[in-house]
Image: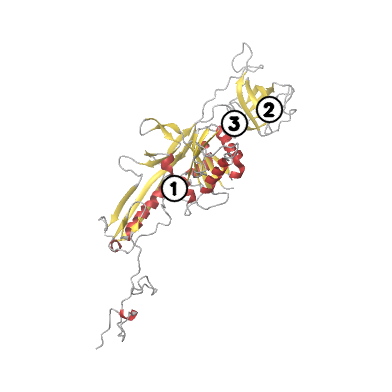
Amino acid sequence: MALNNAFGSIVPSQTQQVLNTNYLTFNDAAGGGTFAQQYLPEIYEQEVERYGNRTLSGFLRMVGAELPMTSDQVIWSEQNRLHIAYDNCSFADALGNEASIITLGGGATALNVISINDTVVVLDPAGLESKGIVIGVSGTGAAAGTITVQPFGTTSLTTDGFAATGLKVFVYGSAYSKGTSIGAGGGNSADRVSVEPVLTQYANSPVIIRDQYVVSGSDMAQIGWVEVATEDGTSGYLWYLKAESETRLRFEDYLETSMIEGEKVDAASAITTGKGTEGLFAAINERGNVNVGFTAGDGLADFDAILKNLDTQGAIEENMLFLQRQTALDFDDMLASISLGTAGGTAFGLFENSEEMALNLGFSGFRRGSYDFYKTDWKYLNDASTRGGAGGSNSIEGVLIPAGTSTVYDQILGTNIRRPFLHVRYRASQADDRRMKSWLTGSAGGAFTSTLDAMEVNFLSERCLVTQAANNFVLFKGA
């Protein structure tokens, strides 16, 4: 009977030479794998790290802190402005003594807290100015109130050329006659309004972040010819070590990017998986400052406009700039344009650069006005797998973050503590800490929890970002 050769075909040859008909080959499914010929190639067992360190996390660790909480929601309150002012006001000269009735703006929540005998400044959008004293009020303590202002001069707002709308009114003091009670004046005995501070509250909810990696027991017992190496130091010839390590690194990046890119679920949305969470970009877009199209060509004029806006906010002295590459170069060019190193110019750096020195064309920090700025590149905005290379009007090109702290009451510690304006809250109690959980299930890799012939690596975290005083943050966007 015939015997079928089960290990390949051996063909006799009259000459002593190497032929592929006399050697076993290791072909892949396509018939042309790496070992499809009899000669052993030179194999590089280690992977080439062509993208360098691929992790993106670290931003929040630089500018914030992580603190536990035991609730589904974190609520904080922020101070309102101290002085009384109204925007978007309108007027009508309704009295014969040059006085004007001014309807206060500011929306339905802006209550009238101006009293008789208060002295006010009225500003026109074009720069006109008039000062006067309040001789009448209506709608006191209610929205859409009015005040009657008697100018100190002899002309009215109309004759002075004031616009009918878009006025700004603010109180700078008061003036009373001798022997009068507070609030009285001009024959009107109305009581003076007490200004009660109003809390402005904000809230955010944590989001549950999860991931999982699964490997069968057979694959765990199979070695490869490529030696794996990852950012966290994992090495060996077991491929699942690389996959599990990269899943963990990717999840750790998600812990940060979820806090940066997070969005709350709109009431009209069809999403039913939760409320979402407010990330850094969403908070600045909603409550902060957005600068569109910063370029070096505009020089200090564009940046000074940002400083003037910071003056109207908290005026925090030290700030951090986290920028993508082009915006960082724009800042370098802006600073270099006023530090030419030529005759009469100022050389780069603290000391003059000699011709033998390596020329440093970058700046890590600078001071402008009363503010200090420390500049650094933000890898998240440069990486091609995230926001790197994205252009257009919605591209994020950098963020300015104040380096100060705020005083808040901590319910867990039972005392007032100082926290960074930007910090992460994660769910934790004595029973369970959900800051960063990982556990194994299955029947392989040391886990014996089920009959599944595999190892399941689970990751979970529940957290949210608290962006306090977002009016001091600046988001740089593309033009």
Observer-nearest of 456 and 300 = 300
Observer-nearest of 428 and 269 = 428
* Earlier residue among tags 3 and 2: 2
| Secondary element type, mark 3 | loop
Q: Can residue 312 be seen in the rendering of this structure?
A: no
Question: What is the count of numbered marks?
Answer: 3
| Secondary element type, mark 2 | strand
Label 1, residues with CA under 10 Å away: few <14, some 14-19, many ≥20 = many
Residue type marked 2: Glu
Residue type marked 3: Ala
At 62% from the left edge and 11% from the top edge, which residue is drawn?
A: 179
Label 3, residues with CA under 10 Å away: few <14, some 14-19, many ≥20 = some
| Secondary element type, mark 1 | helix
Which colour scheme appears in the figure? Answer: secondary structure
308 lies left or right of 239: right
Tell me whether the residue at label 3 lies in contact with that at label 1, contact meaning CB atoms closer than 8 angstroms.
Answer: no
Give the residue pinned by disc 3: 143
Image vertical order of residue 68 relative to residue 178, above or below? below
Residues at marks 3 and 2, CA–CA distance in whole angstroms? 25 Å
Give the residue pinned by disc 2: 129
Give the residue pinned by disc 1: 258
Query: Splitting the image into 4 quarters, where does residue 453 fall?
Result: bottom left
432 lies left or right of 388: left
Residues at marks 3 and 1, CA–CA distance in whole angstroms? 39 Å
Q: Can residue 392 be seen in the rendering of this structure?
A: yes
**Percent of width and height locating residue 141:** 57, 27
* Earlier residue among tags 3 and 1: 3
The label nearer to you, 3 versus 1, is: 1
**Percent of width and height locating residue 140:** 60, 26
